[in-house]
Image: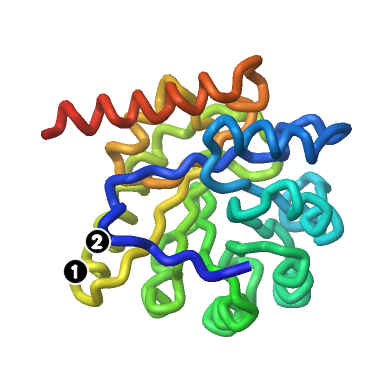
């Protein structure tokens, strides 16, 4: 586990984070190795408690089990649980590199962010489609990642919500203003309905890190899908120049 620094010189680069929620759990280690070899930058790990969201998934034991397969590839743990604080040390010990949580699930957001960073992980807030961005106003100095949900969380395979584009643009403006003032960057991640056909539009709205589940794991050739995602973003960026 380690805090992942946002490199200003690599601000134009994107990160693809396949969500293992859509992987074949009967051969999860192999799936992770395959998707990393195919070009994945992060591994996205969804934790659901059937309380904060209507689904039940995986916990620290699975995170620890997959860490040897991920090797140096960061494991990006998204906690959709309430409460969150008790799980943070467990996931940090299990090998998480990034831990994000929903502000509605913490009574003390600043303290929870500090807890994550104190355990050597990058910290982030997750915003559901209707969650206001104001939660980040007084904790920007403790944010390494902002994750915007472009679906209502709970299940994979949902369609991208178009309203997320405006929210991405608004979040990008906040992050850029903070970076201009402090010199410190923050990753802007998006999760939900990301696919080859819309990734360029999502990138143009401000995202630099893309969680994709069924779009990658539902394909027969992971490498081809990830490469095409990068190509679409690069083509969109070239047209802007």
Q: Which residue is at the front of the view, 140 or 62?
A: 62
Residue drawn at x 58%, y 62% is: 98
Q: Element under label 1? A: helix
> Going 24% across and 61% down the picture, which residue do you hit?
176
> Residue farthest to the left?
241
Question: Where in the figure is residue 173, as x and y percent of width and height?
Answer: 25, 57
- Find the distance from the CA under tag 1 to the CA under tag 2: 6 Å
Q: Single out the residue that lies furthest toward the top.
A: 220
Q: Write down the quadrant of residue 144 in the picture.
A: bottom left
Name the residue carrying label 2: 176
**Any part of residue 50 in sight:** no
**How far across and how far down the image is residue 5, in percent?**
42, 66
Split into 4 quadrants, where in the image is the C terminus?
top left
Q: How is the image coloured?
A: rainbow
Disc 1 + disc 2, Cβ < 8 Å: yes
- Circle 2 residues within 10 Å: few <14, some 14–19, many ≥20: some
List x then y, in percent, for residue 151. Answer: 55, 39
Q: Is residue 187 above or below residue 56?
A: below
Q: Which corner quadrant holds the N terminus? A: bottom right
The residue labelled by disc 1 is 180
Write the residue at 35% across / 39% down: 165
Residue 182, image quadrant: bottom left
Q: Is residue 24 left or right of residue 197?
A: right
Image position of 232 (left or right of 132): left
- Report whether 161 appears left or right of 72: left
x and y, in percent, of residue 99 in the image: 61, 64
Q: Residues within 10 Å of mark 1 (few under 14, many from 20)?
A: few
Q: How many marks?
A: 2
């Amino acid at each position: 586990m380690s805090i992942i620094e946002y490199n200003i010189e690599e601000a134009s680069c994107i990160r693809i984070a396949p969500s293992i929620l859509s992987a074949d759990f009967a051969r999860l280690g192999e799936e992770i190795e395959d998707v990393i070899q195919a070009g994945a930058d992060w591994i996205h790990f969804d934790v659901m408690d059937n309380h904060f969201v209507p689904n039940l998934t995986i916990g620290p034991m699975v995170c620890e089990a997959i860490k040897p397969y991920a090797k140096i590839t960061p494991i990006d743990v998204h906690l959709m649980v309430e409460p969150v604080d008790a799980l943070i040390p467990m996931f940090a010990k299990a090998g998480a590199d990034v831990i994000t949580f929903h502000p509605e699930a913490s009574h003390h957001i600043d303290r929870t962010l500090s807890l994550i960073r104190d355990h050597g992980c990058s910290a982030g807030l997750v915003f559901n489609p209707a969650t206001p961005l104001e939660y980040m106003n007084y904790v920007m100095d403790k944010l390494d990642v902002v994750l915007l949900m472009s679906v209502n969380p709970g299940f994979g395979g949902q369609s991208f919500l178009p309203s997320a584009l405006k929210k991405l643009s608004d979040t990008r403006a906040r992050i850029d203003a903070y970076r201009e003032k402090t010199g410190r960057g923050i990753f802007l991640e998006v999760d939900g309905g990301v696919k080859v056909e819309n990734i360029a539009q999502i990138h143009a709205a401000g995202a630099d890190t893309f969680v994709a589940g069924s779009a990658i794991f539902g394909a027969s050739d992971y490498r081809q899908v990830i490469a095409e995602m990068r190509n679409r973003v690069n083509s969109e960026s070239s047209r802007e120049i």
